[in-house]
Image: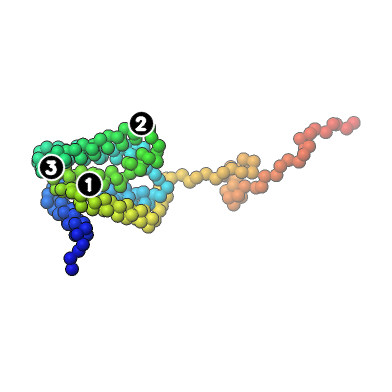
Amino acid sequence: MALPPFLQSMLDGLVQIKDAHLVQPGIWWYLGPIIFLWFMLEIYFGTRKQEKLGWNTSLANGFTLAWISLESMRHLFEAQPDNFWIRFAIICALILYALFIAVISFTHKFSASLVFNLASPNPIYFLCYISVLWGHGALDINQWVALDLVVLYIMLIFFAAILRKLLPAAIKEFGEEPVPKLEIGGGFGPDIQSRMGGHAPPFVPPKKGADKIEPRKR
């Protein structure tokens, strides 16, 4: 049974993406570390659910995309594949995006939520992945391949969200200091609290007029 033209074109695009990983086995020297680091970051943030992406990590992610795209640009000029100028323009756009991420992460010119979303591992490493395939001439991006890449990215976002949800929280790191208890009851510290079973005695306010000095009787 023949598939509808739309689904057949989408399937052909997926086949092209699959074959792109086999055309040049040397690209796995780039794809392997990218995929491994991407996966490990998802594991890290999935097990340490209280930690969020920081400015320094955003800066590093920007430089990661920049040097991957520069390496793709170098290979582009060496190999001179088909559609050279289209490939050149797309890689230039990726480099500009990477530099933009690095600048706004370094200067803190925009809100943290915006920067951390733009520089999070999912978009950065997915763009690194596309940059390698595109710059090394392993993948020809047409409208169907581009649509397949968008669908794959959305699926990866859902997979990452499910993975982070299912991963158990990491145990407390060795040497991590516990959060101190709030001192109550007129300043009773942790030592007194521990001797009293972890609870400070209730605070009893002084009686009214107790601080007055009575006159001496003769």
Name the quadrant of the C terminus: top right
Residue ID for mark 3: 83
Residue 125 horizontal side relative to residue 23, left or right = right
The residue lying at 30 percent from left, 35 percent from top is: 100
The residue lying at 30 percent from left, 47 percent from top is: 122
Residue kind at label 1, given as amino acid type: Tyr
Q: Position of residue 211 (x, y in %)?
A: 76, 35
Residue kind at label 2, given as amino acid type: Thr
Q: Which mark is residue 129?
A: 1
Q: State whether residue 11 appears in this view.
A: no
User: Alpha-carbon neighbours of circle 2 within 10 Å: few (<14), some, or many (≥20)?
Assistant: few
Relative to 110, residue 8 above or below: below
User: Alpha-carbon neighbours of circle 1 within 10 Å: few (<14), some, or many (≥20)?
Assistant: some
Residue extending furthest toward the right: 218
The residue lying at 71 percent from left, 42 percent from top is: 205
Q: Earlier in the sequence, mark 2 or mark 3?
A: 3
SS of the residue under disc 1:
helix
Is the C-beta separation of discs 2 and 3 under 8 Å?
no
Relative to 5, residue 125 above or below: above
Distance CA(mark 3)–CA(mark 1): 19 Å
Res 120 quadrant in image: top left
Q: Which mark is residue 107?
A: 2
Relative to 5, residue 217 above or below: above
Pick the residue in front: 114 or 191: 114
Res 185 quadrant in image: top right
